[in-house]
Amino acid sequence: MDLIYILLVLLVATRLCGEFAERMKFPALVGELVAGITLGVIFHHYSSTFPVLSNLPENEVFKGLTDLAIFFLMLLAGVELRPKDIVKASGPAFAIAVGGMIVPLMAGMGLGIVFLPESSLKMAQALFLGTALAITAVPVSVKILMDLKLLDTKIGKTIVSAALFDDILSLVLLAVLTAILANGEIPGVDRLLLLVGKVILFFITTSVLGLYVLPALHKLAARFKSDEFEFSALLMVSFLFALLAEELGMHFILGAFLAGLFFVKRIMSDEVYDTIKASLTSWTMGFFAPIFFASIGLHLDLAAISEIPLFLSMLLLAAFLGKLVGAGLPALAVGFTPAESIGIGSAMSARGAVELIIATIALEAGLFNHPDPAPPEVSFLFSAIVIMALVTTLVTPVLMRFSIGNPGHNRAQHID
Amino acid sequence: MDLIYILLVLLVATRLCGEFAERMKFPALVGELVAGITLGVIFHHYSSTFPVLSNLPENEVFKGLTDLAIFFLMLLAGVELRPKDIVKASGPAFAIAVGGMIVPLMAGMGLGIVFLPESSLKMAQALFLGTALAITAVPVSVKILMDLKLLDTKIGKTIVSAALFDDILSLVLLAVLTAILANGEIPGVDRLLLLVGKVILFFITTSVLGLYVLPALHKLAARFKSDEFEFSALLMVSFLFALLAEELGMHFILGAFLAGLFFVKRIMSDEVYDTIKASLTSWTMGFFAPIFFASIGLHLDLAAISEIPLFLSMLLLAAFLGKLVGAGLPALAVGFTPAESIGIGSAMSARGAVELIIATIALEAGLFNHPDPAPPEVSFLFSAIVIMALVTTLVTPVLMRFSIGNPGHNRAQHID
């Protein structure tokens, strides 16, 4: 059976490379992406030896599985994000988040407007570039802060709060982007208002359902006798939220994310919550995520490096400087030292799953097919974005260790 | 996204019907199958209202998912089966298992030889019928014994041991059946010997890997730092065993089952084992199994009842009498009372996931397309087998309660 063969090869390659990356003190995601890229090159060169594997990007079942992988990654991201943490986030974190969002967004859009050719989708491509640069990977930053034993310090909490804000803001940007992709062009003011109305309607509906209906539903589910009914209930709610998002013109990942956000310990027994969360984590991190990151790597074309070297360099520069200036300056302004501000700026530089998910969505929606034929800046845009994510995520831990990783410094700043 | 819509509809329908069945003291599987059948009828009649859902049996992604569902159901069946329990099974259980296997096997093959039309696949179809009748559903019997509080009694342990033997024997039958389906005809003596050699090679290879290599691998995996690596390791091993089974001409479910069998507590920490088993159970019972049973129901054509009433009645009769005589007589011979022997015979009557999995495999392999055009006995064979599974599983609990469900009897027989 082809599917099992595919899954075995991808799982072994990604998990071993992921482990290697972890040992080198990089996020596992970096290793998993590199595994996918390497496999892609191998399959491409020896396509007659690996007929099933070299056709992977066209395999419908594999595409369906990566869609499910995206779904469960976003659901887990929602489950792991505690709304309370965002509300608790202080003023400085918010300023850092907004700065670290707007500057890269503008830089990315500017880059797009200057470099990309005219087409009906040019503005959408520019907005996509901006969104991709604006995102920060919460789990990557958290992982590095844990390694540096800085998670519980003032600087650690500020970084995590700011990254959380960024995650939410980037999903709102994604909602706009999805609507534009569906329309094929930048909407007028009337359509934009309609879109904003739908986004608000979506958040209100899911919030009402999440805060008032879900607790009652979970109480009901607890009285069901079938095995694992409560796990099924979480899946049902998240599928429902995902469909609601699609109905209102947004992407299904927004629904999955919000369903995860409302899945909280308060509305069920501790034991049930812990079991469900552990199951979701096992399958997402142990099965779906590696498959998804491998698929990203398989789609990547390394020729981007030789085809659009100038554009790629500008993109990398914008990715670093955007976050460093956008998040670092507000940090400096609210009283962090220059070294700390550089640390905060570089911590916000890491991209991760959400950025790769958004890039995949844009790829599937055909954003990189216009104008037709597409010049290299457009046809290699997906690969450029993935390379950017890879490089920033690789450099972030190094920069953070360099700026705020001094153990003496940590002891001085520890707030407990 | 179509897939999410499909999964939501199927999950809600199957789980609610499954819960209803449980409340009526029937196995959840019965409700889930009925949900699938009902949905199939609705989609068929209102195909313009549900374009996506009415095309489900042709949906490649959905097919891939049901294949994964079959895979994980068999993996979980292996994990839940403890080899020790089979070894411990006493002589009487073995006699009951063999009798309860051979008589229905012969009855099914006889039925096929008499009723089915000549074609190159006639013997394969007859063997399939025999295999389908010979299977006993361990989980269904266990569930009913638990409900009757009979699991820890002599009669309960005998039933479970015998059903376990049957499961193993039916998988060996499936190995033969798969080889025949691959060849398109009954193999000659030379090919049959080759097949037996391959089956033996498969069991020896997996046993050596399972008993000597896996413990070392799990020790290694425990030292890996990546999240959920040990869960991935179980998946890798089961994918590998599944591919090995396919390479040797057997079906992949045999590999999944054996991988589960060798996944034991002894080779890892209790905590890791419990977490992995819980995750596997959540996803299999809460996501994959309902989807699989719904897909079975969707493939079912109720017209079988009006098109081949005689054949269907004979099949049902053979299903009951085969087990009642085949398992009941040895039980009587080793000293159980007549009522207990009837109880044992009817407990062995329940069919379940494994039988439906084998039917699905045969359907996908095109067993029911010969001769071309196929007469109703052949084209409705799949539906007839599913109806048989449904009816026997529905009647089993009733017969068991009637024969051995007397509480006074239970107390007298309790061995602890």
Image (cartoon, coloured by chain):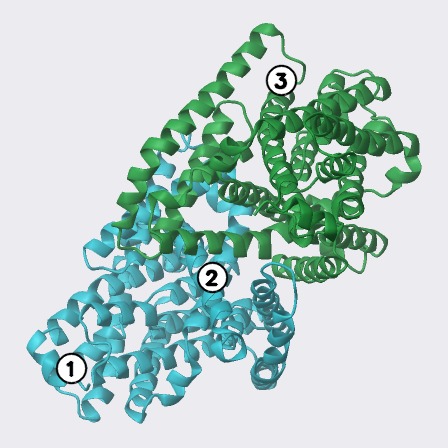
Chain colours: A cyan, B green
Q: In which quarter of the image is the C terminus of chain A?
A: bottom left
Question: Please, what secondary structure does the residue beneath circle 3 have?
Answer: helix
Mark 1 → mark 2, Cα distance in angstroms? 35 Å
Q: Which of marks 3 and 2 is in front?
A: 2
Q: Which of marks 3 and 1 is in front?
A: 3
Vertical placement of B227 versus A146: above or below?
above
Residue A228 at x, y percent in the picture: 58, 60
Q: Which chain carries label 2?
A: A
Residue indicated by mark 3:
B183
Q: Which residue lies furthest to the front in this view?
A: B412
- Neighbor class of circle 1 (other Cα within 10 Å; few <14, some 14-19, many 20+) is many
The answer to whether tags 1 and 2 share a subunit is yes
Q: Nearer the viewer, mark 1 or mark 2?
A: 2
Q: How many labels does the image show?
A: 3
Mark sitting on residue A280: 2
Residue with the mark numbered 1:
A340
The percent coordinates of residue B152 (x first, y second) are 59, 47
Q: Which residue is drawn at 70% across and 22% down?
A: B102
Please say whether residue A208 is visible from this viewpoint: yes
* Element marked by disc 2: helix
